[in-house]
Image: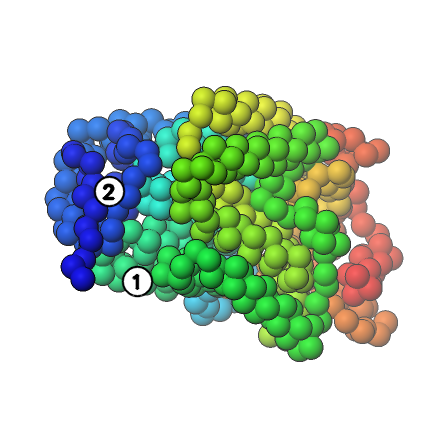
Amino acid sequence: MSELKLRPPKGWEMPHPFSVLCKAGRAPWPEVKTETAGKEQAGSDASFFWARFRRQGAIRFAGVSAVILIPLYWHQRIEAGDLGSHLYNAWLAQLIRQGKAPGLWIARQWNNVLFDLLLSWLGSAFGLWAAERIAVSLTVLTFFWGAFALIGAVTRRPPWKLCPLLAVFTYGWTFEMGFMNYYISLGLCFFALALFWRGWNGARLIALALVPLIWMAHPLGVICFGGLAFYAGLAKFVRARYHKFLLLAAGVCLLDFRMFLARHYAVKWNAWARYFFFNGADQLALYSARYYLLYALFAALLVVAVAVDASGRRREGGFWDACGIPLQLYLVAGTASLLLPSIVALPQYNEPLSYLTARLSSVSGILACWMLGAVKPRKWHTIGYAVIASVFFIFLYVDTGTLNKMEEQVERSVAALPAGHRVVGDIDSGASRVVTEHIVDRACIGRCFSYENYEPGTGQFRVRATPGNSIVDASEVGDIDDQTAEEVAKSLDRPVYEISQCDGSTVNICVHELTEDEVGELVRGKFEN
């Protein structure tokens, strides 16, 4: 039997995986293409890429990129949880190289370091404050355009109308927590998946070449890439009626992995995950309870949009072809949130790996956007995206502005203290899902040492510390006797100051010099926790 070849509509060209970033036009909807036709046009796409970029996409690409970066520059400081700690440790790395940080050293490490290496390299060239802006800008653009490229590659039309929603997830919980290495690993993962999905063999080789870079950023990014690519590849080559068995197999594998972790490691399960909290929409729930309105709005928009599209295509078919794979991947990610632990204690680290299921919701959020990009676009979709994005960024502007005022107070308080002193922070996040205590770390750069900074003591980052140093607490959590606690307390070069909020105030900051007894209580409290 001769091979049946379906010809694409006249004038339509299959986009190169990266050309979806730039193409201003829109493909006919729906469309059908065979793998053979895709291979025939793959070579010609590369030659048209730069011409199309210059002619149609460059201005739009630059304009959208500029808009996406606005939240990084609308305040004096970037508020993003652990970002302050990353910047502080980049400064410690400079002191280590200069021989001014006794007891600290830089480990040779090949994962969880990409953002830190970028920050250090830019800091040497432009200074730490400029490096922070440049490195975070590059990271944000990598995540946004990676998600854009993935959705464009699989739907075969550039998802410009999804840009407001993609911007929301770009500044969602994972970014606001400041998990920069994991965050950039996801952006690179999305780029690799875009290349792998529609690319010819050369593009897939490029996707595989990105894997070491993703690993340098964070191992979870490699796991996401491998899992998503493997499942999507199977789903593309297996008949739709057998997809339910793929879902079942994925669930069994996750259950088996759950039991493996429970048998071999100390783990902690997150009760929220069992109530389907980590479904992607939780990326919109940040600093206060009002963000849960956005959580509900996005969840409702997703369910209604998919249901309406499925109902509209019930007679003519095509819904499963468009939304089947992202829907399955979304269900697998949701199952992982239910079954996997939130905290895993690995023996090679002093501190456990945390927020695992919450981090996974970034992937669920982009998979949800993939489903919305795959359904037939409607005007009310665009209105919904714009409303959610507008309210989200208004809330974000107000809350990060409040944090900026608090950090300004912390900087003034630290600047008034003797140079080279030790500080500990007691900044309460309150009802916020985003940690805020690292504003003390950033305020200490060039002025003081943040004794309770968590990075060197975990063994998970490149800056490490030996127990008993006077710069950072590197003691392991566990059983401790009074003599050891006393030795650790004496290792601090007093005075030690505590930075805290006055009477629970959000902005007003108080400074208190710890007595010898309070320093001892601080050390013993660390071990008790």
Considering the image in quadrants, where does the N terminus appear? bottom left
23 sits left or right of 168 in the view: left
Q: Earlier in the sequence, mark 2 or mark 1?
A: 2
- Residue at 16% of width from left, 34% of height from top? 10
Q: Disc 2 designates what residue?
A: 15
Towards the viewer: 477 or 410: 477
Q: Which dot, 2 or 1, sits closer to the camera? A: 2
The correct choice, above or below, for 506 with respect to 252 in the image is above
Considering the image in quadrants, where does the C terminus appear? bottom right
Tell me if I can see residue 79 in this picture: no
The correct choice, above or below, for 37 with respect to 206 in the image is above
Q: Disc 1 designates what residue?
A: 209
The correct choice, above or below, for 307 with respect to 470 in the image is above
For residue 410, which quarter of the picture? Answer: top right
| Mark 2 element type | loop
How far from the left and from the top, in percent, is residue 244? 52, 59
How far from the left and from the top, in percent, is residue 216? 42, 62
327 sits left or right of 322 in the view: right
- Residue at 28% of width from left, 32% of height from top? 28
